[in-house]
Image: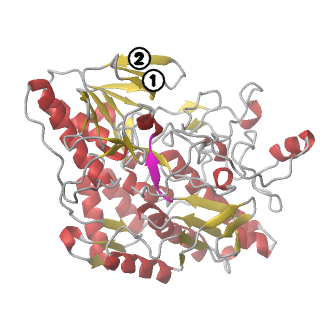
Amino acid sequence: MIVGAGFAGYRTARTLARLARGRADITVLNPTDYFLYLPLLPQVAAGILEPRRVTISLSGTLPQVRLVLGEADGIDLDARTVRYTDPEGNPGSLGYDRLVLAAGSVNKLLPVPGVAEQAHGFRGLPEALYLRDHVTRQVELAAAADDPKSRAARCTFVVVGAGYTGTEVAAHGQLFTDAQVRKHPLRKGMRPRWILLDVADRVLPELDERLSRTADRVLRERGVDVRMGTSVKEATHDGVLLTDGEFVDTRTLVWCVGVRPDPLAESLGLPMERGRLLVEPSLQVPGRPEVFACGDAAAVPDLEKPGGYTPMTAQHAWRQGRLAGRNVAASLSGGELLPYRHKDRGFVVDLGGARAAANPLGVPLSGPVAGAVTRGYHLAAMPGNRIRVAADWLLDSLLPRQAVQLGLVRSWSVPLESASPELARVPGRPERQQEGPPKQQPEKETPMRPTDSAEKAAQNETGPEEPRPRPGREAAQAQPGGEPAKNQPGGEPARNQPGGEPARSQPGPDALPEEHPAPGPVRRTDAPDPAEGDS
């Protein structure tokens, strides 16, 4: 039984299926029917790759593995069962002889007022699709606005977090918006502005300083406003207040500060390390030889750095998944369990266009050479869709991008506070709550009268002079510039994001019944750990 089909879970299933050769019943429990290759998600948001290019069918590539669509609600270690809820809200239970917990991670939040209501994360395919539509819509609304202040606010995009994800989102985003205004005669004078914030003292603080300097130089040359040692103090309808006291007018706040382990790991009541399940070097849970854990949900001892644990990255999740599959097979056949060891093979960061920063095998590269190495690495690492991805890259180099908004994902359907970022929220479907101790949030708003609340819920998000409604308070109002949501994508990866649920028909905004109002964000109750990193 494998819970999760991200980098760790997918690799575990594939390795175990190859070794078992039909002699074991292998089941994968995952909210979606695909494995998401998360490193290429910024290219989906920038319109370079189509969404299906970065999704790998679980049933198509794992024919000997049984796929059960659902979200794990709890695990009974003594009874050896996993409780889950399927996409239609029906409960179920699965038994196991061996359990591999590879549940991945969710967005990491900080106690910043207004962020949960105003920001959106970047952990799943629905969030990437929403960001592409939202950025395109803001540029189009800015072009039609008469007020220079409103136009500037809509053309300002703030990204918080200068790790892998935030850096790539800002780099691709700047190119994406520049292309929308550069050759358009009626958009002359519009200057899209991307701001990248982080409390660290440099971009990509987890990487070598040479890679950091390369990425910083490329971003600044492209026009990205890079501000290190700065973050968001408060988020409002009209913009964000920075920690240095400046207020930035914006309609876009992208939250890429990192990830935290899936709350499912903490619910087991076993020894933890900063939200991650403590395991032995063999990936077994101490005292539970039938339970293995890997990926972002597991604190795996780093044998190369005694006393430490491997970071939450896709590279480690992929390698740990392979070892988990081998050790599970060994535990069933009486073989020897091997410890997890790794060697640093370098990192690659795609900066858009032909630019990248890479250090394969410790050799620092930049410019077009790094870009070629980066794309070659991704093609080699992807377990499928290589020809389709290469074809999209070729078409993008020859043809202009299609900057259109499809309106498939609404703001309220991708809340930042979600324990399932791989799934777009659908009215009437139960949501898995994040767990943790209660947290007090300072109240910043003046309580409204019931009539005021109703008026505010009825506001349209794209009114040039009206504040942007918060997710969960739109009452399923249609987002301007797009059609009512019809086929909501079912989910995401990635780098630990599990596979997916087929798109379900979504009624138009005016057809929502009273008993199923547009759901708001899940209220977070756990205290975030600032020590967790960006995977």
Residue 307 x %, y %: 26, 56
> Is 488 part of what is drawn in magenta?
no
| Left or right, residue 469 beside residue 101 | right
Q: Are marks 2 and 1 in contact (CB under 8 Å)?
A: yes
| Left or right, residue 442 beside residue 179 | right
Residue 387 x %, y %: 28, 52
Of the two numbered discs 2 and 1 on the same chain, state the one appearing first in sequence: 1
Q: Residue at x 31, y 74 (%)?
A: 208
**Quadrant occupied by the N terminus:** top left
Question: What residue span does the magenta drawing correspond to?
Answer: 257-262
| Left or right, residue 29 beside residue 380 | right
The part of the image, by quadrant, that contains residue 79 is top left
Q: Which residue is mark 1?
A: 84
Give residue 351's mark.
none
Q: Amino acid at mark 1?
A: Tyr
3D distance between C-alphas at marks 2 and 1 = 6 Å
On the question of residue 126 being in view, the answer is yes
**10 Å crowding of disc 2: few (<14), some (14-19), many (20+):** few
